[in-house]
Image: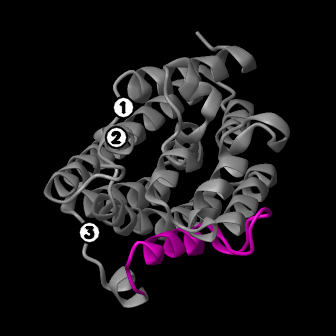
Amino acid sequence: MKRDHEAYKEHIRSLVGETYWESPPAMYLFQREYMSRDGALFFALEHCQFTDNFPRWFGNIIANCPFIDARAYMIGNMFVEEVKDPTIDVGHNESMWMFAKALGANEKQIREYVPLIVTTMALHYFDNASRTKPWLEAFAAIGCLELLTNAPLAARYGHIPGNSSQPWSKLGLERDALSHWTAAEHADHGVGDDGPGHGEDALELLARHAVTEEDQERAAAALRESILVHKYQYDQIGLRAIELTKQSKPVGI
C-alpha cells in the first residue's frame, strides 16, 4: 500500500534506525571507549576516501535525473562538499584532509593511501549504484545515506552521529583541525537554527518523487542495502582503529 508523504518519511526514518542505530558499527565503540591518535589517523585516512568520492556520486545521479528540483538540491550539496561550506572557508573534503593532516598525515600519504579492501569494495558499490540504478533509487542510496548523520534520529536510539565534534575533541587538536566536524554538525545534524539537515532535506525530496507504491518500496530497499554496505565498512574500520588503540595508548590514559 502506498504511504502518504509524511508516513513514508517516518517509514524511512524507522528503516534507518532499525538497520543502523539499533546495532551501530564498531566505529562508535572506538569513539566512545578507544579513542587514540593512531586509531583516529587510520579512520581519517579511510574516511578521506569517502569524502573525496561522495560528491562525485551525486554527479552520476544528476546525469540520469529529469527533475530540476532534485538536480538543484544535489548541485547545492556538491558545492558544500567540494567548494565551500557556509560555516567554514573550505569544502567538506578539504576540511577532512585538514583533520588527517592534524593527526600527522601529509598530502602525499592521503593521495596515495591504499584503503582496506572493504573500503575499496564499498566505494565501488556506491559508484555503481549511482551510475546504474534508476535515479530515484540511486538518490535514496546516496543522498538519504546522510540520514545517518541526523542527530534527532540518532537520539531516538541513544546515540549521537559519528560526525559530531564531541568524540573527536578528546584528541586535543586545534579548533581548525576539527572544522570538518563542526561544519558537519551545522550541515547534517538537523537541530536548532541550522534547519533540518542534509539527510532530512534528502528525505523530503525522496518522498516528493516516490509517487507510487513501487517507487516507495524500491527506494526503501535501495537505501537499506546502501546502509548495510556502509555499516559493514565502518564496522571493519572501527575494529581496526580499536586494535591500533590497544597497541598504543588511548587518549586520557
Looking at the rendered structure, the kind of residue marked 1 is Pro
Q: Position of residue 182 (x, y in %)?
A: 65, 55
Work out which residue is located at the far bottom of the displayed protein and give it: 108
Residue name at image x 49 percent, y 61 percent: 172
Identify the residue at horizontal 50%, vertical 65% (top origin): 51
* Sooner in the amino-acid sequence: mark 3 or mark 2: 3
Q: Is residue 89 magenta?
A: yes
What amino acid is at disc 3? Pro
Q: Can residue 4 be seen in this view?
A: no
Q: What element carries label 2?
A: helix
Please name whichever residue, 151 or 171, is drawn nearer the observer in this view of the structure: 171
Q: Residue 113 carries which label?
A: none
Q: Name the residue under label 2.
A: 231
Q: Is 101 positioned to the left or the right of 85 in the image?
A: left
- Foreground residue, 119 or 106? 106
Task: Verify CB contact (< 8 Å) between mark 1 and mark 2.
Answer: yes
Magenta span: 82-106
Give the residue at x 21% y 47%: 239
Position above or below: 178 against 201: below
* Residue holding disc 3: 115
The amino acid marked with disc number 2 is: Lys
| Residue 37, above or below 160 | below
Judge the density around disc 3: few (<14), some (14-19), many (≥20) Cα neighbours within 10 Å.
some
Q: Is mark 1 on a helix, strand or loop?
A: loop
